[in-house]
Amino acid sequence: MHTGPGTYHPPRCKALTKMNTMKRLSLKLAAAFGATALSLGALAQTGPLKAGVDGTFAPHAMPKMGGGVEGFNVDLLTEIGKQLGRPVEIVAAQFSGLIPAMNAKSLDFVGAPTTVTPERAANLLFTEGYLNTYYQFVTAAGKADLKALEDLKGKTISVNKGSAYDKWLIDNAPKYGFTVEAYPTNSDAVQAVLSGRADATLGGNTVSAYAATKNPGKLQLSTLTVDQGLVWAAVFRKDDPTLRNAVDGAIECLKQNGTIAKLHEKWFGTKAAAGSAAVTVFPGYGVPGMAGYDAAPHDMKCK
C-alpha cells in the first residue's frame, strides 16, 4: 500500500490481507455451523409431529370410549414423542392411504405397524424393527384347520387392502389356487370370516391373535403361518433421514429402558422373547440388510 510519495509498507498490506481472509473464513464457518445447528434443531420445534396409524388395527390402534384411538402403537408413539421432546399427533386413517399421505407431506411419518420388505425399502426409509412379525391365518371356529399352503386351494381369503399380507396373497394366489378379497380395514377382513363371506383371513400374528381372543368360539388361529423373518417399523419419506434417525434413536432408548417390553405385555399379554426386535437394539439406523440402512455408529441420547 502507498501512503505517500516514495513510502511503501508491504508488511501492513500482508497483515490486512490475512485479516480479511480470516474474517471471510470465519463467516463461512459460522454460516456452515449455523446451517448444521438449524438442521439438528428442526426436531425441537414446538408443533407436534403428525404420525399416521390404521385406527382399526387392534390391538395396535383402535377406537376407544370417549373418542380417539388406543393401542400398542398409540402408546409407542406417545413415548417416542417424550424421547424427542416433541409431541406426536396421531392421525387415524385407512392403511392404504397412509404412505401416500406421508409422501404428500400431510403426515410426517407412518406410525402404524408396517412390514419392512425389500420392495418397500427401495422407496421408503424405515427405523429399526420394534416387533417381529409373521403371517397368521385365522378361520371360523369349528372349520377344518389350515396346516399347509396346499390347504388354501379353493378358499376365499380376506385381507386388509394395501398391506404386506395383501401383496403376499396376490403373489401366491395363482400358485395355490385361492381367491383374494381385499377390504378397506383389517376389521372388515375379520368380519368377512365371521359372516361367512371368506374362509380365512390373513394378518400379522399379534393382530390375528387379538381377533381370535376377542371372538372366542367364533374364530380360531390356524396352524398355518408364514414366517419370513420380517419386522415392523416406522416409515419415512426417502428424503427425510434426519427424522428417521431421530425416531430410530428414540426407539432404541425405549428398548433399552424396557418401555417396549412393558407395552408388549400390556397389549399382547405375553413377555417379549429374549433376542426379539422388541428388546434388541440394532446397530446403525434402519433395518440391517435392507435398502436405506445406515450402518454408521452413533451414541444413544436417552431421556
Image: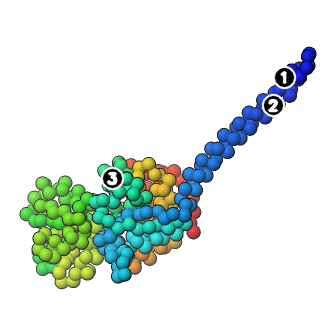
Q: Residue at x 19, y 78 (%)?
A: 219
Instruction: Please tell me whether residue 68 is drawn above or below residue 238 in the rendered image.
Output: below
Residue 106 pos. (x, y %)? 39, 57
> Circle 2 is placed at which residue position?
16
- Asked whether 273 or 68 is in front, the reply is 68
Disc 1 marks a residue whose amino acid type is Met
Residue 84 in picture, x, y percent from top left: 53, 64
**What residue does disc 1 label?**
1
Labelled disc at residue 120: 3
Considering only order in the chain, which callout, 3 or 2, is on the residue closer to the N terminus? 2
Q: Residue at the location (71% across, 36% down)? A: 24
Tell me: residue 66, above or below residue 280: below
Identity of the amino acid at label 2?
Leu
Task: Left or right? Give the position of 217 relative to 269.
Answer: left
| Disc 2 and disc 1 in contact, CB within 8 angstroms | yes
Q: CA distance from mark 2 to mark 1?
A: 10 Å
Tell me which numbered mark, 2 or 1, is placed earlier along the sequence: 1
